[in-house]
Image (cartoon, helix red, strand yellow):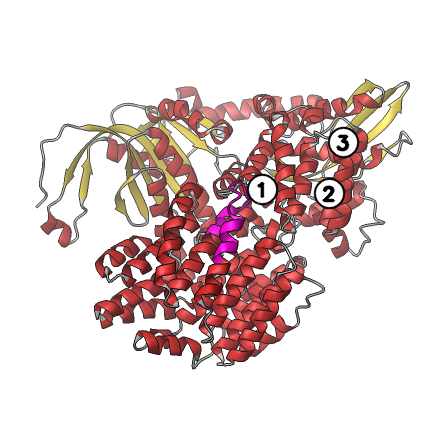
Amino acid sequence: MPQHHADAPELRTLLLTDLSDSTALVESLGDGAAAELFRDHDRLVLELQQRWRGRLIDRSDGLLLLFERPLDGLGFALDYRRGLDALGHAHRTGPLLARAGLHVGEVLLWRNSDEAVSVGAKPVEVEGLAKPFTARLMHLARPGQILLSSVAEPLVRRAARELGERGEALQWRSHGRWHFKGVPQVQEVHEVGEPGLAPLRMPRGDGKARRDLPVWRRPLALAAEAVLVAGVAVGVWFMTRPEPAIAFSERDWVVLGDLRNLTGRSVLDDSLEQAFRISLEQSRHVNVLSDLKVQQTLRQMRLDPQEAELDRWVASHVAAREGARAVILPTVSEVGNNVQFSVEVIDPVTLDTVYSERATGAGLESVLDSIDKVTARLRGNLGEAMASIQQSSTPLPDATTSDLEAMRAYALAEIAMGRQRLDDARGLYGSAIRIDPKFARAHLGLASIAWALEETEVARRHVADAVRVRDTLTSRDRLQVDAWQAEVSPGGGSLVHWLTLARLYPDHFGAQSNASWYLLMEARFDEAATHAISAAAAQSPRRSYPLVHLARAYVALGRPDDAIQALEEAQQAGNAPSVLTRSEALLLLGRDGEAIALLEAVKAEESPIMWLHAQRTLASIALGQGDHERAVRLSERARAQAASMQPAVARHYALVDAIVRSAAGTRPSAAELSALERSFRTAMADREMPARYEDLFRYALLTYLAQQDGHAGLAAGWLRWLEPEAAGAKNRIVDKMLVVVRANQLRLEGRLEEAGEMLLPQMDGTELVQVRVVMREVERDRGNLEGVQAQQRWLDENQGRVLAEVAASQVMQVMNVVEAAPAAAAGTAESRRNARAGLARTLRPAGLTPCRGTARSCLPRS
């Protein structure tokens, strides 16, 4: 029986949700696929519950949660809506939608007895009128709709400002007064949602809820009125019918046609088109199909992108192929002594002009201001509220540059970037900056190229230049500058910024792609896949890169066939570097010969970084085949080549070489390890070093290697230096590696219980592979054979994780695949060292992603 406590009613925010058509979903997917989907759903709920501080009372197809603050209930509901959308994409089920009702009211709470819970009762019971009322709201909602009570709406609306720009973008609608069965008073019902996700439609009533309508609006009265009104309306329509119009929905895509320059002044050709594009892209509601995507579509139409003119006819065909809602054709002309900028909005189906706008100014210097005026009016007529325009827009000359020559250079640089001509793009961005040193977008363009080429100091300088003019930028560009500032900082931590940008601007493909990469680094593979899918939308010009991220996530999740499929799609979409990820999938499938051939085909002269990573993976395979001499030879060759490259690359491959030699039985001496340790510590003496956290991670791994090779005294001294440095970095992957090293040191000191207690909290699904390895050794030292087998079973069942762990450019790849092998689980410490030096089976080694983030994938960030 439940234990009732005489607690007073408590005021709480209640959220009730129900997954639409869940039974049909299970029938269509089958039990196995449905179970996998619902496991992912439960992980989503747990993450959101922790993020928004919710208390989960009941869970099945629906959820009942309590929150202390109305804002937390709103945040959960909004993120749950987005999360379901991503789950649907990830599992290819089509849209996943839930009804949601949010109310604030008094409830009674009591805890059931342990006996009741043990036979299936819920730990906590909730009662009170607020609960069935919230259920009525939820049942009234359409799929995907979040309905609020009149009590919750003002509280939530006032608190929404704490969400920043996301809160400002929310859409609110009143759906009038409703009668709910069992509720005596008429209730006002409201809706809230994000642009493009909220239905914003009147709910459908049923036997439990009906609208409170005045007599004249009830069905019989309306029928009579309709007959009278219809005749009048038909006549009025013929006399006053307007021009045809396109009804735009949120975040519709448009195709920007070629600028018609009727002035004869060539300086306006590319610069004005780029300026107009930038001005349109300030909106969160209008997306312009990129130049690169247009070029890809033109090739599919068998037209030469260099020759084809994107006029009314061609642009409309592109729009039809890509699902764009409209074509926008800009024109610049001279009218007397003035310069006029005008646009036409074209319906791509009928090719009719449905709207036009123009602005005129004196002289060329007026053109950018005219673009702003035209764009502001255009955006208003495409469905964006004037208040939103005023809040989000920055005058174009401030947001970019007021110099037409600088804008032209930038426009040409963007074209070069789309074609992956990095040298040309670097020169053109540089020209734009020489003309206008405060041109923030050009500085970020140069930063992205430098970061991709491991020129970290150069990247940091250009980001600093962009930061200095941050206040002149649009809201969207300011967020991107903030993300880059974190990117080049010593402690990293850019994930939160990329996630913020991705959530506020879901069609910012660069943010989605970068978020997916850093989620991979943190071993949050399901989330990484979700963002990679968003970044790989058909409209994304560089969708091949997030498709490679998606493939890596699939490898980690043990889905190599899906990984291969994603890579095939990436190959069709572009030429993103995918050799290493493909080799991982092939190795996971047991197709080792194909993987080796693929890696051996990489040429040093074509891609030095990629070649280094290929040698590392080939060395891992050689270790697995027992060819230790070949493994060491490959590793030493990579180390020698890396020595002439960037210092960070040289340190990385010196460490990889030490790990390979240790695994091959020719362990480096204490003196060699100490020399390598000094090189890392010397580099990290620069506390402002960009991405310093990666060298801290490698230093932790070097300490771990010293422990494994019997140099516990050295490792203890290095650990004392590392701990305060890691605390200052405040980087999650460094913290995770530090736990591995600390726990292993405790194990070596015989403090087995402390070591085990330190490792257990790490085993949350995002742990490093080496957490399981050290726990296996702790259990062995305890004499717990079942514990050893349990950890080895996890390693055997998660070979995809062993392959796909990407922290610090997968510097742990060799150690992971060697230590995770069954041979490493056998016998005494000495026999385990011998086993690591002569593995009896082919290992399944992972490929190394060539670069950090989208930028470090050999392509600068969007």
Q: Is residue 553 visible?
A: no
Q: Secondary structure beneath disc 1?
A: loop
Numbered mark located on residue 414 in the image? 2
Q: Is residue 741 magenta?
A: no
Label at residue 507: 1
* Quadrant position of the C terminus in the picture: top right
- Furthest residue in direction front, as rendered: 671
When asked about the image quadrant of residue 511, the answer is top right
Residue at point 52% right, 77% down? 622
Amino acid type assigned to the residue bearing label 3 in the image = Glu
Q: CA distance from mark 1 to mark 2?
A: 19 Å
Closer to the chain start, of discs 3 and 2, is 3
The x, y position of residue 343, in whole percent, is 76, 30
The circle on residue 344 is 3
Q: Amino acid at mark 2?
A: Glu
Three-letter code for the amino acid on which mark 1 is drawn: Asp
Give whichever of discs 1 and 2 has the lower sequence position.
2
- Spatial distance from mark 1 to mark 3, Cα to Cα? 24 Å
